Image: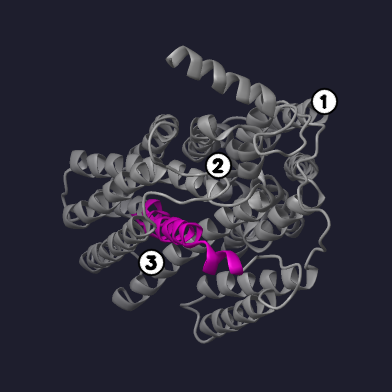
Amino acid sequence: MPGQQRSGMQRGEDQSSEQGANGERITTSPNAVLFSVCVAQFLVPMMLTAVGVALPSIGRELKASAEQLALVEQLYILGPAISMLTFGRLGDRAGRVRVFLTGLILFTVLTASLGFVRNIWMFLVQRFLQGIGASMLLAGSMALVASAFPPEVRGRKIGIVSAFTYSGLSLGPVLGGFITSRPGWRFLFWLAVPFGIAASLLCLYRMRGELRVSGKGKMDWKGSLIYAIGVALVMLGASRLGAGGSGPMMMLSGLILLCLFVIREMHIQDPLLEISIFAGNKFFTLSCFAAMVSYAATFGLTFFMSLYLQYVMELSARSAGFILLIQSVSQMLVSPAAGRITDRISPVRVANCGIASVSTGLLLMAFAIRTGASLHLIAADLVLIGAGFGIFITPNTVAIMGSVEPRQYGMASGMIGTVRTLGMVTSMTVITLVFSILMKSEPVTGATTPAFIHSMQVVLFLFAMFSALGMAFSLRRGPRHKSPQRIE
């Protein structure tokens, strides 16, 4: 029987190269889809964390101010935040392969050109456009994988994709530090180009079919613009909460625009975001909320743990970096295994175990943080958090993609990226607010160490509450959901 089941699964994968796992007409190789998506999922986060390490060298050579250097990372994140939902929907309308390939070419060209820039303002413009290219890649990635592979093997494939994402996050700082100190930061961008070219050629020759399932409707470009401006104002306002009244006013204006966007989407024929899916598909809604608060609970951890390890524990930047790698490496190692398990048992059960591990790790970390804390205990907590998040996010993604119809894959894939971004913004906003209230925006010094540790403990308890909320959402959705792709 196991041999027959394996043979059937293999036939399903072969069939998807011609017809698709869900009845769509596809003339593309599933393995080509998997390779191209893995390359994209590796390069995009690697370009975030690696460039972060190279910022001091970039600033010195391009004579950039501290505010301009902060924009280098902020604009790269802003691009996907404002456009991922749009490109996910555009993939459903115009063709997912077409959007993905366009993004891959755009991302590769801009990555190469960033290595030749001589002016900080041009660098910032191209960095933002590189983020737009990244958005086109990420928006439809999960939709491509969900369409190319049948449900019985989808979990392990998404687990592989997740492992490449965490590999990019983990190796980025290492590659960034090594390349910047040796050949120079420009080679950091040129290093990614051969991989982008290889993936682009593979798309051209092995992914010729169009995963297009709802091309009759019109794109809601006006809604896209309202959404983009609203998200941009919220993100930029969140980064300026300590700058007086401008930050809160920007956030309030952005939230008002997002409310107007939701109202608009409820009353037009071809919405960018099908609001009805949230009311009519509780499983999808709770899965998205669980993902959002989970990212809110974990994204900011690296930021203040880096400060803690260097300022309080007095470790070198290199030693602190290796300790922080523990979390990402744990996520990378468990994601493929979580995907394989998801193919055999309920993804909801696997996700529940993962989010429980994250909540426990964050709570233990809150009690462990102090002057002279045990590095072994901190490392163990990072393993618990990282492994738990890896166990959660892969089956949760499988659950989200399996709870919608094939025609909605692009929208669901874009929504996964959107809730990820919203969670990240929430995480950093919480850190900014707590630090500004408890530390009065003072730098971390020997005199402010007690206030800094207290601030960290407050943030960690809040993160643990976010994670517990995510667990509540995950449990509330139930073990089963009847949909075109049933989740058992």
Locate residue 465 relative to residue 479 in the image: left or right: left
Residues marked 3 and 2 touching at CB (< 8 Å): no
Locate residue 49 relative to residue 293 in the image: left or right: right
The C terminus sits in image quarter: top left
Give the magenta part as a residue range: 276-304
Name the amino acid, label 2: Ala
What residue did someone put label 1 on?
205
Mark 2 surroundings: few (<14), some (14-19) or many (≥20) residues within 10 A: many
Q: Residue 463 falls in which quadrant of the image? A: bottom left
Give x and y (percent) for residue 138.
64, 47
Locate residue 303 relative to residue 43 in the image: left or right: left
Q: Which of 293 and 453 is in front in this view?
A: 293
> Does 129 sit above or below residue 34?
below
> Does 152 sit above or below residue 483?
above
Q: Distance between the residues labelled 3 and 2?
A: 23 Å
What residue did someone put label 3 on?
431
Q: Nearer the viewer, residue 280 or 379?
A: 280
Q: Which badge, 3 or 2, comes first in the chain's sequence?
A: 2
Q: Which residue is drawn at 43% across and 15% down?
A: 1
Q: Residue 208 falls in which quadrant of the image? A: top right
Label disc, if present, on residue 50 of the rendered structure: 2
Give x and y (percent) for residue 395.
44, 42
Q: Which of 434 and 418 is in front in this view?
A: 418
Q: Is mark 2 on a helix, strand or loop?
A: helix
